[in-house]
Image (cartoon, rainbow, N blue to C red):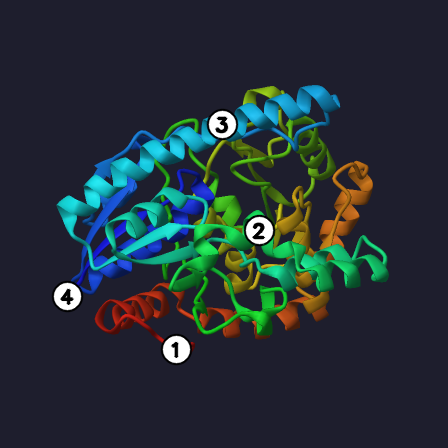
Amino acid sequence: MSRMLLAPFPLHGHVFPMAALAAELGSRGHDVTVAISPPFAEQFRKSGCEVTEVEIEPRAGIPKPPVGRGVVASARAAREDRHRVAEERAKLTARLAGEIGRVRPDVVVADAMAPWGADAARATGTRSAALYVTYALNEEVILADMARRLAPRTVRLLRRSRLLRRHPAVRDPAARSELVLVNSVPELQPQHGSFDDRYHFVGPLRPAVADRVDTDRDGPNRLPWEHIEKGPTLYVSTGTFSTRGAEFFRAVAQAFAGTEWCVVLATSHTDPGELGELPENVTARRHVPQGAVLEHADVFLTHAGMNSALEGLVLGVPMAFVPSFWDQRTIARRLVELGAGIVVDPSASAVELREAITGLAADADVRATLAELSGRTARHDGPVRAVRVLEKFAAWGSVGRG
């Protein structure tokens, strides 16, 4: 058996796939140590991992995408942020290097957004693997995205100049790792054929069975499982880092007030108290057991983050997308192309929103497409595939795409 040191990034969307990987490694007898900040430590301890608590400056969630600022103020803020991030990276690299010396792992697995893991592995001469929790990036992916916004001549010039080789996403430690695990499936990876054999698209990295956790089964915060399971049910989650604000969630509640639908809102950084009095058929909580609710959902209104997109695919739930950021827009666009859902305007009226959701729920073509995609996606068994790749890497030092 091997010793593994995992370095997740401390955000829910990053911890979730790393936790699934850690649990599978432990179940196969490997020794797993996880270096993570205290708020996420217990999640790894529950799966039998040794946890080293490391103070990592949290990247606080925001209620909606940031708005623009003046040029001078933005430049100053960006410069200060770069300096702060560089200082933290150096401090965490030294901390992880010490932990590597203590644990002596065969492999360090670091989130692509936790470069201190790869830096520490390189400094100590330890093999390392990177984990992308969304799709991977390279020059071709960035060029394809630019081609949607720029003139063809500009894109050709960029390609010939090779300037994108200096892009941070191309130069970061994850892109240079000996092994790269991607929490995605080929269907959701832009420019899939442009990646070399170091990249393994193992996703979805999620537990095999949804965990129906309801910590307040008989109290006021209990979810209405009898209504969720009876349906029709709309589950709404717009992300744990950047989520929609109270106005959006109120609009959804208004759209389905008094209908036969059971609506569950996962509001994350938006306080449910800001929504005011909700209709009887609408429940709002900051966090809910997503997989358990999705197993009974008829439509999933989502930001199109990779974890949520994959979970919707595995469970065959029609998805309505309200993406906020570039990667979410790419994932949403691809899923619409595949026939798995629709994009909705977050500022749509209550009537428009209700018609879009109910129409999606009744769309037989979407259901048929999802039935096929669900079977294909579920067969990937991300945690098992990822661990098998890591086992070969730990034993032999290299592994083909396979």
Most extreme residue toward the front, as rendered?
161
Residue type pointed to by label 2: Gly
Is label 2 in a helix, a strand or a loop?
loop
Q: Is residue 217 visible?
A: no
The residue identified by callout 2 is 231
36 and 370: which one is in front? 36
The label on residue 1 is: 4
Is label 1 in a helix, a strand or a loop?
loop
Above-or-below relation of 69 to 314? above
Most extreme residue toward the bottom, as rendered?
402
Residue at the spot 48% in from the left edge and 49% down from the top edge: 293
The residue identified by callout 3 is 83
- Sequence-wise, the earlier of marks 3 and 4 is 4
Locate the C terminus and report the quarter of the image it occupies.
Answer: bottom left
Q: Residues within 10 Å of mark 3 (few under 14, many from 20)?
A: few
Q: Residues within 10 Å of mark 1 (few under 14, many from 20)?
A: few
Tags 4 and 2 touching, CB below 8 Å: no
- Sequence-wise, the earlier of marks 4 and 2 is 4
The Cα–Cα distance between marks 1 and 4, rounded to whole angstroms, is 21 Å
The Cα–Cα distance between marks 2 and 3, rounded to whole angstroms, is 51 Å
Locate the N terminus and report the quarter of the image it occupies.
Answer: bottom left
Q: Nearer the viewer, mark 4 or mark 2?
A: 4
Residue type pointed to by label 1: Gly
The Cα–Cα distance between marks 4 and 2, rounded to whole angstroms, is 46 Å
